[in-house]
Image (cartoon, helix red, strand yellow):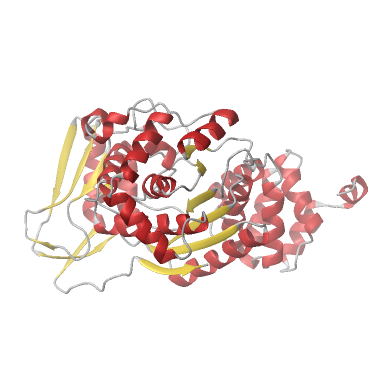
Amino acid sequence: MSAKAWATMNAVDIITKKKDGKILSPEELEYMVMGYTRGEIPDYQMSALLMAIVLNGMTREETVRLTEIMRDSGEVMDLSGIKGIKVDKHSTGGVGDKTTLIAAPIAAAAGVPIAKMSGRGLGFTGGTVDKMEAIPGFRTSMTREEFINSVNTGGIAVIGQTGRIAPADKKIYALRDVTGTTQSLALITSSIMSKKLAAGSDAILLDVKCGRGAFMKSEEDARQLAEWMVEIGNAAGKKTMAVISDMNQPLGRAVGNALEVIEVMDVLKGRGPADITELSLTLAGGMIMLGGFANTMEEGHAKAVSLVEEGKALEKFREFVAGQGGNPHITEDYTILGKGRHILEVKADRDGLVTGLDAMAIGLASQHIGAGRARKDDAIDMTAGIILNKKIGDKVNKGDVLCTLMGNDSIKIETGAAEAMGAYELGSDAPEKNRLIKQIIE
């Protein structure tokens, strides 16, 4: 934008225009986003614009432009030094969602180069970086040269996001979090896709969650979000597809960092819970297809199954851990990950069937016992977490263990136990079964 055009713009006029439901020009969006990122536009004006967007929405064209502006606000990774079709994966957030640590090594074992940046958890959702740091010695920070070399030699590297990637999104997201402006299709789309496009991979697989433990509560909302993100990814020259999956109850039976790493290894050994296994194999199959090692999702899924059965996926996980400084012996000795000093069982107070298991409530209980953080600088107890002994559809008798909490703070565990108990709904009628994988958008 020219200096003259910039000088003629006014934040109040732009806020008013969106408040009145009008379409913002690319120049107006750039003025607000880059002005705010540089500190020239104050929080209160950006908050007003965000609220106007939440209330009046944005067109797809506005959303595409907003995504591009946030992508270009910082570094766009150049991964041309990595051979092959680089495939990235993103989940919109969930409880017990450890699919990256399962699907990525499976896809890498098939030959797909995985050069991925992941985030930390905040609130009731877990973060891949936190899970990886539960492994003793594991490094989530690398130089660019180390990152590229790790992918070229081992086929996979997963690191934490740097502050140089989409800084506009980082600043705007923090403001959205404290101003009640998180629930916007356009803002969610641009936030996710600006980071994915800046991360430099050639193809993107999106796992879009819906349900009680997801940002998108309905399948229709999740489908709309998925379609927008797929359209933006493809328009940017990245082959993009999305899987819409259920998040009405937690994925798998482990919630909490070290506990989830153990479940990752169980899945890679072919003995993990059915739901996390099914979703991980589906996502791995999609990544294998996007990477050019399968012609269809079905063929990719079949390859993923074979790689697990043959032990090649577990071996790739072991190489991945060792390649980033972690202790690879965790695959044989789970005690290396440590164990919380305190354990508390939550037991059923009556007979019945589990008719509901609130994923968000379990996620919050896990956070409150030390497995997550409310603020970005909160410390995490890597051993803290919840094992779900019973899930939706399971029969229980009075006194049966519904879930088991563990960690190093007995007072927090007592509080978390009450929250976990409240997450369970017991009844006499068999619940309607939710489909885990609801739709695939290619």
Locate residue 366 relative to residue 24 in the image: left or right.
left
Measuring from the top left, give residue 23's x and y in whole percent: 75, 66
Determine whether, in the image, residue 128 is placed left or right of residue 370. Answer: right
Where residue 88 sits in the image (x, y, percent)? Answer: 52, 49
Q: 290 left or right of 427?
A: right
From what the image shows, is residue 361 above or below residue 373? below
Foreground residue among 210 and 109: 109
Residue in view at x 37 percent, y 57 percent: 303
Name which residue lies at 65% across and 67% down.
56
Q: Does residue 81 sit above or below 47 in this rendering?
A: above
- Occupied quadrant, residue 259: top left
Front position in the image: 338 or 125: 338
Image location of residue 404, percent across then percent down: 18, 45
Q: Position of residue 17 (x, y in %)?
A: 77, 63
Of the pair 155 and 272, the residue shown nearer to us: 155
Vertical side of 137 occupied by 68: above or below = below
Would residue 350 be found to the left or right of residue 336 on screen?
left
